[in-house]
Image: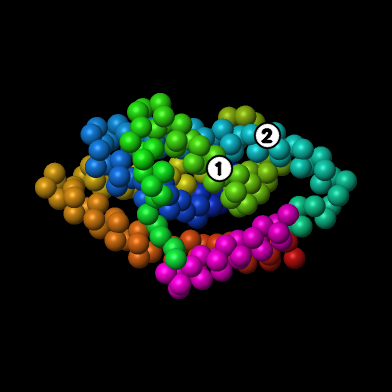
Amino acid sequence: MFGLFVSLALLGLSAIDPIGIAAMPILLLQKKPFMRSFIFLGGSFVSLTVMGFLFARGFGAIFLSFENSHTWFMPSMEAIAGLVLLDIAGIVFWRMKSGKLSVEPSSAVTKRLQLGGWQLLMLGALLVAVQSILDVVFVIAMIRVGRLHLPTLALLAAIVTYAIAALVLQFAIVAAYRLAPPNQRAKTLDRVHVLLVRYADKALVGVSFLLGCALLVIAA
């Protein structure tokens, strides 16, 4: 069981969310920065937990039933997921080299980050829900957890572990801003932005490549 929680925490840490990370400095520069940041992160956390439970308990049972009569299904899914991740790594790397990639949130997302509390909560939930559906590693991880037939509380604890790990970078930005002296907070956000510009895309390429290779090896 401990190994399961460790593996889910590592997978959560690998789920780099450039949009969510880039949203933090924008929210922290608004009025009531901590409340608004936690509203956004609360929506993301609830969405991750609900999506994880749906995939683990709902879709996991469907996939398991199908896999029992089609043993090739799960390895094929893992191989396809590995190829998708390698493709993502290649596309992001090419866009980095061509200068066509930006870590800045789109103008539409930036505008919506100005919305009121409930809208902001829903925005955080919606962004994570869409990314979770598109994140093949998240889908496969939740399906594999569902195959273990864990009790409901243990399953929720496992999913919450993944959700917390997936959002830890966003929480770290808020914590760094909170702990910085008031006259240093603007500089703290500037440093976050510099790190995001320098390393977020590179980290996404590296994580996608390594996870893609790992899935291909597991599927082989």
Instruction: Give the side of residue 75 with respect to residue 212, left or right.
Output: right
Is residue 68 inside the magenta stretch? no
Q: Which residues are magenta?
A: 77-99
- Residue, disc 1: 130
Mark yes or no: residue 3 visible.
Answer: no
Residue furthest out toward the top: 118
Q: CA distance from mark 1 to mark 2?
A: 19 Å
In percent of width and height, residue 155 lies at 60, 35
- Residue, disc 2: 57
Depth check, mark 1 against mark 2: the one in front is 1
Give the residue displayed 45% in from the left and 73% down from the top. Answer: 97
Tag shown at residue 62: none
Give the residue displayed 57% in from the left and 62% down from the top. Answer: 88
In percent of width and height, residue 173 lies at 31, 48
Describe the element under mark 2 as helix, strand or loop.
helix
Question: Pointer 1 and pointer 2: residues touching (CB < 8 Å)?
Answer: no
Q: Quadrant of residue 219?
A: bottom right
Magenta span: predominant SS is helix
Quadrant position of the N terminus in the picture: top right
Give the residue displayed 67% in from the left and 57% down from the top. Answer: 81
Describe the element under mark 1 as helix, strand or loop.
helix
Looking at the picture, which amino acid does disc 2 mark?
Arg
Task: Report the number of numbered marks.
Answer: 2
Looking at the picture, which amino acid does disc 1 mark?
Val
Mark yes or no: residue 40 visible.
Answer: yes
In this picture, is 7 found above or below 113? Answer: below
Of 149 and 115, nearer the camera is 115
